[in-house]
Amino acid sequence: MRGGRVHVIGAGPAGLTAALRLARAGREAVVLEARDRVGGIACTENHGGYHFDMGGHRFFTKYDEVEEVWRDLLGEDLLVRSRLSRIYYGGRFFDYPLKPLNAFLGMNPWNSLLILLSYMHRRLRPHPREENFAQWVSNRFGDRLFRTFFKTYTEKVWGIPCTELRAEWAAQRIRDLSLKTALLSMFRDTGRRVRTLVDRFHYPRRGPGMLWEAARRRVEGQGGQVLLNHPVKRIKRNGNRLTSLVVDAPGGEEEIGVEELISTMPVTELVRRLDPPPPAPVLAAAEGLRFRSFLTVCLIVDRDRLFPDQWIYVHDPEVRMGRIQNYKNWSPHMVPDPGRTGLGLEYFCDRGDELWSMSDADLVALGRDELDRMGLVRSAEVLEGRVFRVPAAYPVYDGGYARRLAVIRNWLAGLAGFQTIGRSGLFRYNNMDHSMVTAFYAVDRLAGRERDVWSVNEEREYHEERTRGDGGEEESRLGEALELVFKRVDRVSLGLSLGIILGLLLLLATLVLVVQGGGPAAPVVGLLAQFLPGYSVSWSGAVIGLAYGLLFGYLLGWFAAFLRNAAVFLPLVLVKSQARRAHMRRFLEYM
Amino acid sequence: MQERRVEKGEEGDGHRIPSRLFRMNALVNGIVGGVLGGVGLLVVTLWLVIKGGPNVGAHLRLLANFFPGYSVTWTGSLLGLLYGFAAGFLLAYAASRLYNFFLGLRKRGGE
């Protein structure tokens, strides 16, 4: 790897991971962080010894390298937790991920009947094209279940109607387990399959911020710098080469020369801060991309136990909050006093909108009131509250996002010595581990290795079912073999071919006997007349035999092909059905 | 074996049941048919010879009408092996070629 200093914008998971990797490779990393703490959108806020994880971060990954980083930095502080989370709707709790049967049975009988009828209606008359999220879900669950359990929560999170959310957002979440993968799993050594953290996950003793504080110390211990309160205001460039960063440092504005830059700031902000600005279409594309933000009303409640869940999804349209975090259930070390509970009420909003702009006192009052109305916490039990705002937390996959992102991506690809990574930097709904992997790739690229940061979180494997080790070649060969095994035999072609063969066989056999003048075989062959009326060992019988042979050969071939295909495909249909259920569970997991 | 896509697969939920059509390998099928035919006739003939009796293979020996020189004897069984192989090979080979021919016709017709 070439020497020299690399500047990294942002001390979130991607930025600090990049710095860690750079330090390990012997390069000096200078991380510029706008805020006064590290962790980015995976930070942990602290108020009076109570730790509040912004967003709630389960630690699970299919990437061994990522897990190694976690273990290396946290050691014994990486706890294993059993997971419980449910959905709150209409004063009741439902399983999470949502199980349609559980939702169906949890409703009153009239509602259940309507849900069932609506489901049947959509199965019979699905939306012919699934262009948006509403159509996608309705086709699978029926309109009524969609409106009850999906619409409200999804619109709370994304702030746009479900009809404006691309179906690919849902498809992206469930795309993994292809039928081929499901079939391959039947042939794999099941001992190698690792059922990971669906029901259990890792979590740092005092929240994810602990991990990133450790990362910061490691970077600094290895000669790197992590400069807090250093927001990058402008990124100067000369043509396609970045020349310097203008930073609003605590001591005043500073201009820092750069040779190589890795940015994790929202890609929209990045484009706006370039000096001179990029071409108008790139700026316009950035203007069209939208991030969703959220704020967390953190409450300290004077009760030792409230509910067993780590978090609750609030699908109920009567309240504005989207999720409730119970930090004590993430880790008991998140609260200093075991007799009290720290809650985080998450409200999804847009920067500058009504919720975002409300005063902290009003937001705390809103949270107390909603909790009281839901019957979870009495208002008088709330001791105090704080509000933390998290801007640009989720990239919004609306109708035009893919086209706009492509414009930006293509233009950024032309900048020398520059890479954008992380969730916000790539405008991709990455988990923390994905963001870390984009950092690995970025540092690899600096070392001259071929890597595509945009490919992360695009692959078909899924984090909840993983195979350790490299089984790629084996899978590829198995896949080819399966393609051969599961090819269909064409019924008509086999029928015709066997018909012709059998017809000709009868014709020739009869003609041979006729030419020979009968002989001892003729009476025996003639017995076929018992099954083939009109047949005889004669010239005309030969023609009739040809016709019979064609007919029975065709039927024989057609049914043989049909039975063979059925024998092969019935198990396949079962596997497909299982795969579909697995996909659906995965999708619901992300709701 | 080669493969030909004749129809689109069943699509849905991102899964697709493989629907490529099976194209036969005529030579392999011919050899399989030949072995089955040859060994089959050999075994059947030998079985009757070993079993013995007053009128050994009264019906089977009628095959001599189609396979000159064949008889239900030790030497006839070897000849039967050759005839059976040849007939089985030809039938299976021809059936496979015909199947592939019709498959091709249907594919062209479907495009």
Image: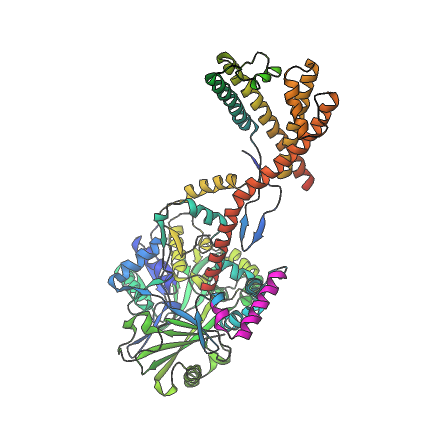
Q: Is residue A551 left or right of residue A584?
A: right
Q: Is residue A473 visible?
A: yes
Rendered location of residue A354, percent (x, y): 50, 80
Foreground residue among A397 and B52: B52
Q: Residue at x 49, y 40 (%)?
A: A480
Q: Is residue B2 left or right of residue A84?
A: right
x and y percentages locating residue A205 in the rendered image = 28, 68
Q: Nearer the viewer, residue A580 or A387?
A: A580
Viewer-nearest residue: A492 or A226:
A492
Is residue B101 among what the camera can see?
A: no
Please, which residue is most extreme toward the right here? A540
Residue A300: image quadrant is bottom left
Segment tinted magenta in the rendering: A102-125
> Is A103 contained in the magenta span?
yes
> Is residue A473 placed above or below A348 in the rendered structure?
above
Q: Position of residue A382 (x, y in %)?
A: 35, 84
Check the image and report above or below for A469 versus A222. Answer: above
Magenta segment includes A414: no
Front residue of A385 and A449: A385
